[in-house]
Image (tube, rainbow, N blue to C red):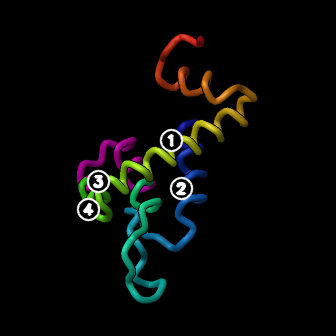
Amino acid sequence: MFGKVMSGIRRLVARDAVDGRGAPSTTAGPQRRPNLFEAAAAYVSACAEDDQRGIEEASGWVSPEALSFGVNELACRAVIALARERDESPRSVARSLLGLPVA
């Protein structure tokens, strides 16, 4: 289920054409630098798949601060999407994902 949510979030965040690694596709026109949301989507996906090469690559696309902001935004959107899907509060979903008791 987490993979399904991540896939949906990845489509929302990175609407431009990308290749299988999350890098901008060279067939979509002139090469451009990935934005922070594309970097965050690629970074989180690589972390979930334990892909060290992908983690390192996505980490180099933007500054550490921008990547941190993007990952935070992605986490917020993921929790909101799961909360809506489960008809639960974002707080209970976040605690559940982290294995914490529901407060």
Residue under the point 71% across and 29% down: 86
Quarter holding residue 47: top left
**Residue 90's image quarter?**
top right
Q: Are marks 4 and 1 in contact (CB under 8 Å)?
A: no
Check disc 2 and report its element: helix, strand or loop.
helix
Give amino acid for label 4: Gly
Q: Which residue is mark 4?
A: 60
How many C-alpha atoms fall within 10 Å of the one at disc 1: few (<14), some, or many (≥20)?
some
Sequence-wise, which precedes: disc 2 or disc 1? Answer: 2
The label number, if any, that marks residue 10 in the structure image: 2
| Residue segment shown in magenta | 41-55
Q: Secondary structure at mark 4?
A: loop
Residue 42 counted in the magenta span: yes
Viewer-nearest of discs 2 and 4: 4
Q: Earlier in the sequence, mark 3 or mark 1?
A: 3
Q: CA distance from mark 3 to mark 1?
A: 16 Å
Instruction: State how far apart marks 4 and 3 are (Cα).
Output: 8 Å
Check disc 2 and give the amino acid type: Arg
Residue at disc 1, secondary structure: helix
Q: Which residue is pictured at 55% across the width and 59% down the height?
A: 13
Q: Tell me, for residue 64, which label it has, or none.
A: 3
The front one of 35 and 27 is 35
Decide: is 46 above or below 90. below
Q: Earlier in the sequence, mark 2 or mark 4?
A: 2
Q: Quadrant of the N terminus?
A: top right
Q: Write down the residue under mark 1.
A: 75
- In the image, which is nearer the foreground, mark 2 or mark 1? 1
| Label placed on residue 7 | none
Helix, strand or loop under label 3: helix
Residue 14 % position (x, y): 53, 64
